[in-house]
Amino acid sequence: MTAKTAPLTGSYSAEDVEFLLKDLSEVKLERPTEDREEALQSGVHYSEMLPVEYQPSESYIQLFHQTLAATSRKVALAAAACAELIIAKRGYNTTIASLARAGTPIGILIKRYIRQLHGRELPHYSISIIRGKGIDENAVHYMLRRHPDHSIQFVDGWTGKGAIRQVLTRACADFQARYGISLNDDLAVLADPGCCAETYGTREDFLIPSACLNSTVSGLMSRTVLRADLIGPQDFHGAKFYKEWLEQDVSNLFVDRIAAHFEEVAQEARELAAARLGDPAQMAVTWQGITSIRRLQEAHGIDDMNLVKPGVGETTRVLLRRVPWKILIDRADNPNLEHIMLLAQDRGVAVEIDPQLEYSCCGLIKKLKGAANE
């Protein structure tokens, strides 16, 4: 298979990443939040439209910078530990395939760490995976052709209840059945509070600064799009490049600030990786978050699991681009939740304390009609 569209780099350097995505920048795909939520819950697939990009207030932007300053070493350690595990498990003949778009900055951090601390240059691409649709097979074929002696390591930002890991597992099985090519569904993530991944930086549900924003911390790229009238059988999945937000872009600032800590965290990262490799129980996938989600469904009368979004990253997404019903937090003094409280106040969303919550927070989406499918 051949894809017709050359890969993009967004606002990143070509040394950091190539986006295997069709450029849809000139297509109007955004829909207002309320309209989009009604469409989602009426059965329209989320990949057929885009949310209007949330433009944060000045105080929120300041909070991003404060959070980045406060957590940059912590994020660096998690990225470094993840990178060390990848090298130990997969070796240097590995292609990093980050899942657009939350996975992209994490894939860049992993690539930079390996370059900086191991002196090796791993290819890195950002590709699309869509719930209910699967992975972009044209992008996978492209990577396999360009690097025939490499295995592929899929990378994402964090896990919630593990939906994308499940999509990836199914996609890898389908790829094997269709083409006779085996792919490893071992998804590497920076944070794995749901215990859905074997390769992770941390299982703490903390605020990754890149979760605070949308395109302006992800190379100015939109979420990915898959619509039959826009994406042909030989095309990559699509996305938009929001060049109009260049002045607000902090994508490179984010990765630069975190990468600056790699030297100081390297030894600790090696020790973390060695400890996990020596004790497989530390890397076991237990899907413990699912139990928590079912309890919340019962407690709040929610019949659709897709309306429950656990974890700091997913709750942030609910507040940035969905129609929230309420936000649950584990405790009022949780330092990871300052941006959640600010967003909830900005949108007039109720916040409730649930001391039994296994995550730092959880976003509950307002049920309009039908069922949500994002």
Image: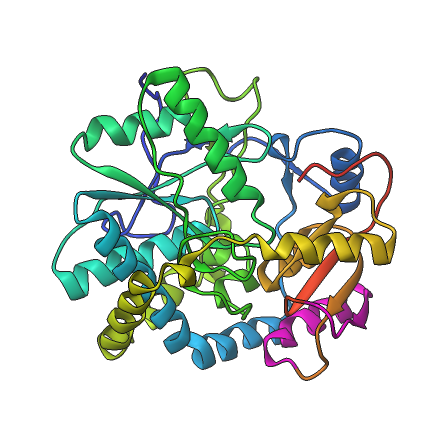
Q: Is residue 200 visible?
A: no
Q: Is residue 231 above or below residue 364?
A: above
Instruction: Magenta stretch: give its range.
Output: 334-357
Report if residue 347 lies within the magenta region.
yes
Q: In this rendering, would 27 be left or right of 319?
A: left
Q: Is residue 141 visible?
A: yes
Q: In this rendering, would 256 be left or right of 217?
A: left
Tell me which residue sits at (87%, 37%) in the image: 369
The residue sitting at the bottom extreme is: 333
x and y percentages locating residue 162 in the rendered image: 56, 48
Report if residue 8 lies within the magenta region.
no
| Residue 186: quarter of image | top left
x and y percentages locating residue 30 in the rendered image: 65, 39
- The quadrant in which the C terminus is found is top right
Q: Nearer the viewer, residue 213 or 338?
A: 338
Tell me which residue sits at (17%, 48%) in the image: 92
x and y percentages locating residue 15 in the rendered image: 23, 50
Q: Is residue 362 above or below residue 197?
A: below
| Residue 173: quarter of image | top left
x and y percentages locating residue 155 in the rendered image: 39, 48
Which scheme is used to colour this image of the protein? rainbow
| Residue 291: quarter of image | bottom right
Q: Is residue 209 above or below residue 50?
A: below
Q: Nearer the viewer, residue 289 or 331?
A: 289
Q: In this rendering, would 121 be left or right of 79?
A: left
Tell me which residue sits at (70%, 36%) in the image: 373
The residue sitting at the left extreme is: 119
Tell me which residue sits at (38%, 67%) in the image: 78
